[in-house]
Image: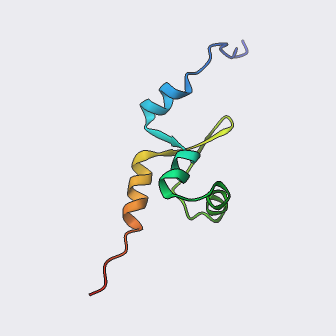
């Protein structure tokens, strides 16, 4: 018997909250970079890993936190 897709719509906001995800716009705002710059950095692979769901790109908050910690520059002595 073929698998029937459910007609139930997914609550994306609830899913984002449960999985602790942020949108690419939220990430770009956090980093204070323009959308074009963010897209370029995504292509270059210099941002945290992203996840595609439907038309959106999402970032796991814990991966963004870890990535930000790795970007730390130690002060000069």
| Quadrant of the drawing holding the C terminus | bottom left
Q: Is residue 4 left or right of residue 15?
A: right
Residue at the spot 48% in from the left edge and 25% down from the top edge: 14
Find residue 51 and report its horizontal and vertical position in percent. Answer: 58, 44
Residue at the bottom extreme of this rendering: 77
Residue at image location 44% in from the left, 53% down from the top:
64
Look at the picture and state if 61 lies above or below 36.
above
Label count reads: 0
Residue 21, x across and y down, in percent: 48, 40
User: What residue occupies the far left of the structure in this picture?
Assistant: 77
Quarter holding the N terminus? top right
Which residue occupies 64% across, 54% down? Answer: 35
- Seen as rendered, the residue at the extreme right is 2
User: What is the image's colouring?
Assistant: rainbow
Q: Is residue 62 left or right of residue 49?
A: left
Question: What is the quadrant of residue 34 in the picture?
Answer: bottom right
- Which image quarter: residue 57? top right
Can you give x and y, in whole percent of width and height, for residue 11 in the image? Answer: 55, 22
Q: Position of residue 49 (x, y in %)?
A: 53, 53
On the image, which quarter does residue 70 sit in?
bottom left
Left or right: 25 as drawn, with respect to 65? right
Q: Is 18 placed left or right of 55 in the picture?
A: left
């Amino acid at each position: 018997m073929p698998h029937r897709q459910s007609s139930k719509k997914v609550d994306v906001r609830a899913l984002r909250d449960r999985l602790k995800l942020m949108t690419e716009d939220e990430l770009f705002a956090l980093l204070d970079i323009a959308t074009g710059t963010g897209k370029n950095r995504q292509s270059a692979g210099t941002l945290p890993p992203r996840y595609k769901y439907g038309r959106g790109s999402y970032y796991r908050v814990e991966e963004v936190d870890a990535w930000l910690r790795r970007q730390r520059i130690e002060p000069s002595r």
